Amino acid sequence: MKNIDYEHGKVPGPESGIEIRRSMCDVCSPGMHCGLNVYVKDGKILKVEGMPEHPRSKGKLCTKGLSNRQYVYREDRVLTPLKRTGERGEGKFEPISWEQAISEIAEKMNAIKANYGAHKMAFYSGYSKWYRPMLRRLASSFGSQSYGTESSSCFTSGLMAWQVAAGQAMGMDPMHTNLFLGWGANPVFSRWPMEGTIESVKERGMKCIIVDPRITPATERLADLHLRPHLGTDGALALSIAHVLIENDWIDHAFIEKYVHGFPQYAAYVESFTPEQGEALTGVPAADIVKAAEMLHEAGSFCIPESSTLGHHRNGLQNYRAIMSLLLITGNFDRTGGQIPQIHSFLEIACGFETHEEEFMEERFPHDAPKAVGAKEFPLWYELRHDMQANVFADNVLRQDEESMRGLLALGMNFRMFTQDAKYLEAFKKLDLFVDVDLFLTDSAKYADYVLPACTSLERGELKTYPGMLGWYTKPVIEKLGQSKSDAEIITLLANALDLDDELLRAGYDKIVGHILEGVPVTLDQLKAAEWPMKIEGIAPYRMGSTIEKGLHTPTGKLELYSELIATHPEWGLDPLPTYRAPYNPDPEKYPFMLCAGARLPNAIHSRFHDVPWARSLRTDPSVELSLEDADALGVELGDDVEIVTDVGALTYKAIPTATVRPGDLFVYHGYRERDINSILNGTNLDPYSGFPAYRSAYCDLRRVEK
Ligand SMILES: Nc1nc2c(c(=O)[nH]1)N[C@H]1C(S)=C(S)[C@@H](COP(=O)(O)OP(=O)(O)OC[C@H]3O[C@@H](n4cnc5c(=O)[nH]c(N)nc54)[C@H](O)[C@@H]3O)O[C@H]1N2
Ligand SMILES: Nc1nc2c(c(=O)[nH]1)N[C@H]1C(S)=C(S)[C@@H](COP(=O)(O)OP(=O)(O)OC[C@H]3O[C@@H](n4cnc5c(=O)[nH]c(N)nc54)[C@H](O)[C@@H]3O)O[C@H]1N2
Ligand SMILES: [Mo]
C-alpha cells in the first residue's frame, strides 16, 4: 500500500496513534449534553464528532458542539491560580500555588464571617450546573442564604409559574401529544435534540402551533399555524384564546370542578379578552386566535415547552401563567399527552427516578440567617426559590448599607448577563473579597482578588442523568490543562479549608453523588463502566394521574388559576390571577421600535463562543436583524452601521435586513464584549413576580449611522 497519512487524515488506529474517547459536550443545558467522540493523540484533542451510540443525541452535534476543541484550547484559559496585584479591573495578577490561594481565600471568608456574619458572603454560579448542589450546600453550611445563579434569569420564571399553579415543576409529554403548542420555541437554534423529537412525532400526525414574532426554522418546518404576537404580549394572546375556549364551551367542566381552583374569577377576567381585543393588544388577527382555540379543542391533548424567552419580559411570569391556564381549563394536566408532573431527579432534569439531590441541597439551609439578597424586592421569588435574586446583587452592594454583601465567591461570573451591567463592575470594586472561578480570564475575572482555574468537562468526569431513566458517569479524555482543577474539587478544598461542620460536603464529589443516588438501583461503578448513557433498570414507571389524585402542594391542594399564595400576601402587591400588562415604554414618541435582545443564534452561547474562531466565523459582527421595510425606510443595506438608542444608552451594530422580522421589531444577540447590548437595557425594567429583566421587550429607536 502507498504511504497513507493516517495522522493527517485523523484516522484512528495503531497506524496513526489516534484514539477515540467517549465524552459529552456540556456547553449548553444539562438536559441536552450530546455524546462526543473525541479523537485524541499524545494527550491532545485533534477533533470531535457526534457519538452515534448516544441514546439522546444519536450522533448529531450542533455548531457549538463541533467547536469543542477550539473552546477547550481557547487562548485565554486560566492555567494557574492568580492573585491580584494591580487595581480591580486592571487585569494584573501574579500566579500563586493552590495551597496559598485556598488558604488565603478561606481565611478571608472566615474573617467576613467573624466580623460581619456569614450571611455577608454571597455565592454565585454562572451557566454551568454540574457542581451546583455542592455550591448551594457550601453556602448553606457556611451560613449564608445568598446563593444565586444564572437561573435568576433563565427558565426559573416558568418553573415559578408552575409552582404557583401546581406546587411543582411540570414538563411536556411530546411523544404522546396530539398538538405541540410551541410557544416561543425555536428548538433548531436553542434546543436542538428536541427538534428531532418534534419532527418524528409530527410524522405520526401530531399538529403544531408555533407562537413567535419571527419566521424561524421552527415556524417553517414544524408549524401548522404560526401566530406572530408583538414581543411580550403573549399573556393577552393566551387570555383571548381562553376567551374563545370558554365561550364555545371547549373546556373540561368535570376536571375543573374536581381539580381547579378559581375558575369563576378567571372566567370573569378573560371576558374582556375577545378575539378583537386580542388582535388589538397582540397584532395577531382575531381569526387566527379563533383558529388556534379550534385546533386546541380538536386536538384534545396538547402540551407546552418550558421557556426562558417568555420570562424575559416585565409581565413574563404572568404571561406564562396565562399560557398554562389553557392546559388547566382543558384538563391537560397529569394526563397522557398533556403536561406531566416532573419527578425531581438531578440538576433540575426529570429522568424518571427520584434521588436525594433536593434533600442534599436543602438540609443545611440556614433558615434563621438573614434572608437572601433580593428577598425584599421579589418576595414571590424568595418564597418559591429561597435563593438570591442575582439581578439586584449590584444594587445591594452599591447601597453600602447594613444589608450590603461584603464578599462574593463566584463560579463563572459574567457581568454582561445582567441589564445595565456596568453597575456590577462598580459593585465588584466595593467588595472586601471577590473570588472568581472560571475557565477563562474574563473581563469579570479581571476585577477579582483571586482567579481560580477550572477545567472543562473533557478534563474531568461527572454524573450525568437524562430523561428516560438514563445514567452515566463520564471520564476525562485528556489531562487537565495547566494546574486547573474541576469545580467540584475546588469546592471540596474550600469546604475543608473553611473547616465547615459538614462531613459529607468535605468528602468530595463521588461520596456526594453516591449519597444522592442512594436507593436508585445502580452503582457509581456501573455508571463509570458504561461507555455511554445506560438504562437504569428496575424503576416503576410513573402512573399518570397519581399526582393530582394525591392533592397538590398548593394552598388549596388544587391547580390554582387564582393563586391563594399571592392572595394571602396583599403586601406583595401582586395579582392572584394571571393578569396582563403591556411591556414598558418610557416614551412611545421617542422609542417606536421594539428590541428583542437575546433570541438564540446557533453558533453562540452567551459570552463563551464569541472568541471561538469557527463559531464566530458564522457571524463575525455583532448585528441587528430588522425588517426589509424598516431598512428601506431608513435607507439601510446589509452590513451598514445602525445605532440602537434606548432610555439608558446607544450602541452601533451591523444591519441585517431580513424578511423573517416584522416592521418595528429588532433582534440582537447578547454577550459581545465589544457591543454589549445589556449595557443599554434599563436595569430597573424587571418583572416584579420573578425579578427577571425584560431582555426581550425593550422599546428603543433605530438610526442610520452616516458612512
Ligand atoms: N440580553 C440578554 N441577556 C441574557 C439573556 C438573553 O436572552 N438576553 N439570557 C439570560 C439567560 S437565559 C442566561 S442562562 C444567562 C447566561 O449567562 P451566563 O451564565 O453569564 O453565561 P455564560 O457567559 O455562558 O457563562 C458564564 C461564565 O461561566 C464560565 N464557565 C463556563 N463553564 C464553566 C465551568 O465549567 N466552570 C466554571 N467555574 N466556569 C465556567 C464562562 O467562561 C463564563 O465566564 O444570560 C442571561 N442574559
Ligand atoms: N444556540 C444556543 N442555544 C441555546 C442558548 C444559546 O445562547 N445559544 N442558550 C440556552 C439557554 S441559557 C436558554 S435559557 C435557552 C433559551 O431557549 P429558548 O427560550 O427556547 O430560545 P430562544 O431562541 O431564545 O427563543 C425562542 C424563540 O422565541 C421567540 N421569542 C422571543 N421573544 C418572544 C416573545 O416575547 N414571545 C414569543 N411568543 N416568542 C418570542 C424568538 O424569536 C425565538 O425564535 O436556550 C439554550 N440554548
Ligand atoms: Mo438560560
Image (spheres, grey):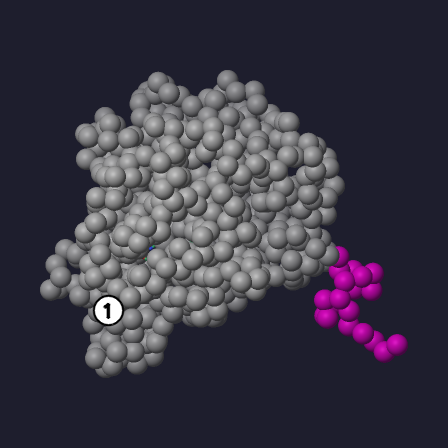
Dominant secondary structure (helix, strand or loop) of the stretch shown in magenta: loop
Name the residue nearer the viewer: 158 or 603. 158
Vertically, is 420 above or below 229?
A: above
At x 37%, y 23%, the residue is 118
Name the residue nearer the viewer: 577 or 364. 577
At x 62%, y 47%, the residue is 459
At x 51%, y 26%, the residue is 359
Residue 463 appears left or right of 372: right
Name the residue nearer the viewer: 123 or 490. 123
Residue 191: image location, x then y, percent: 49, 56
Q: Amino acid at mark 1?
A: Gly
- Asked whether residue 609 is in view, the answer is no
Quadrant of the image containing the C terminus: bottom left
At x 20%, y 59%, the residue is 277
Which residue position holds label 1? 664
Residue 53 magenta-drawn?
no
Quadrant of the image containing the N terminus: bottom right
Element at label 1: loop
Residue 451 appears left or right of 47: left
Range of magenta residues: 1-19
**Neighbourhood count class around disc 1 (C-alpha, 10 Å): few under 14, some 14–19, many 20 upward:** some
Vertically, is 595 above or below 510?
A: below
Residue 434: image location, x then y, percent: 38, 37
- Asked whether residue 662 is in view, the answer is yes
Residue 529: image location, x then y, percent: 74, 41
* Name of the residue lying farthest toward the right: 1
Residue 32: image location, x then y, percent: 55, 51
Residue 309's image quarter? bottom left
Residue 634's image quarter? bottom left
